[in-house]
Amino acid sequence: MNPAKPSLELLRSLTDEHVLTALMRHRRMTRAELAIETGLSKPTMGESVRRLTDAGVVADTGERSVGGRGRGRVASYYALADDVGVALAVSIAPEGIVAECVDAYGDNLARAEQKIDRPAQPDAVAVAVNAAVKRAGRQAARPARLAVVSAAGPVERATARLIKVPDQHFPLGELNPADLLASQVSGPIVVDNDVNWAAQAERDHHHDLRDFAYVFLGEGLGCAVVSDGQIRQGYAGTAGEISHLITIGPDGRATRLIDIFGDLGLRQTDSTAIDVDRLLTEATDEQAGAVVRQALGQAMSGVLAAIVALTDPETVIIGGPWGSHPVILDAITAAATHLPRPVPIRAAELTTEASLVGARIDALARLRKSIITTAHEF
């Protein structure tokens, strides 16, 4: 029995996808260059360029190749149309709000930052998000097709709304980033917590990383579980909330992880947020630091024992402003050697805006897919 031949519509869609992918990679190309790049015939390429131009996703740039006098015919250069839009990548974090506009070539066309007062208030954070996104949009001067948001807090999987949980270091109430951005974005808005985005950035930085746990240690505490290359969010979206795991306290008794920082006097005033500067100062002190390092290493070894037992990672990556500090990482690694199932532990390699990097990478991938889908639907 002969296999069914692909339909003409499918072949056209695949051809158009090859053309768009080539333009996203090379920015501008002639039809002859596109034919060579994709391996398609010139007539097939010409038809594809015509379809994509009619669909409004490709445009003649007005530039022409050098030709004449034995150099061949003058050819037009084609590129993605300017109005195919951009993707928004937004970070909502205690340090402030960042909004970026990324085009389909991966260029960052705009970046806007907005500080927020501490302690953060949900209404003030909402105002700051709107201000940053609008400013970035004006700089980019192109429509936003979609948005990807990183939020420093647990995100409800079904609604993309932030969830209230006990002992939250960055309380935002039930802020809904999708509602905030709906008037400024024409397409889908994806929201996830910052630790998951940081883990995805680390995964994409190392293409061989498929099964690992990413532990974030900063003002707040979190963990992302990556299995078969995919983030495991859990039923409600709160997988990896490790603050209330029972571990070993400074006195050797069982206690919640979050409470240890209160016992050590390492919390910010009137907050459950960890005072990162004070923690680093005390933990790196040559004389008194040994007690703090031992307490932190012991506590985190108990947390890692639970993570390893339940998720079976190949390795554990520790990120965050104090977790990846060499002195503290050494203390955690030393304590973890006594675990029933020891696993390799290493510091995260992406340490600057890792969550925003993860959101930006995802936004770019979604933007490219959206442009290709638009061409298919024409």
Image (tube, rainbow, N blue to C red):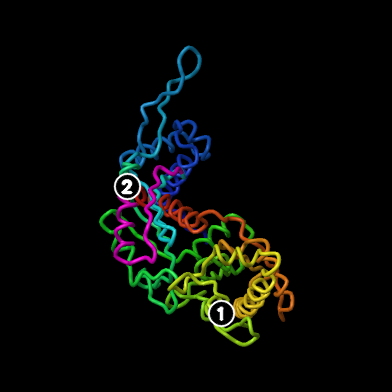
* Residue found 52% across the figure and 67% down from its top: 275
Q: Which residues are magenta?
A: 107-135
Judge from the rendering whether residue 178 lies leftward or rightward of residue 224; answer left or right.
left
Judge from the rendering whether residue 173 lies leftward or rightward of residue 197; answer left or right.
left
Q: Is residue 119 magenta?
A: yes
What is the quadrant of residue 68 in the picture?
A: top left
Q: Which mark is residue 135?
A: 2
Q: Is residue 348 magenta?
A: no
Judge from the rendering whether residue 4 lies leftward or rightward of residue 332; answer left or right.
left
In this view of the protein, which residue sits in the foreground, 298 or 215?
Answer: 298
- Mark 1 or mark 2, whichever is nearer to me: 1
What is the quadrant of residue 340 in the picture?
A: bottom right
* Residue behind mark 1: 263
Badge 1 crowding class, 10 Å Cα cut-off, few under 14, some 14 to 19, many 20 or more, is few
> Given contact means CB atoms under 8 Å apart, are the residues at marks 1 and 2 in contact?
no
In this view, the residue farthest toward the bottom is: 253
Q: Position of residue 362 (x, y in %)?
A: 46, 56
| Rendered view: 98 above or below 39 | below
* Residue found 32% across the figure and 63% down from its top: 178
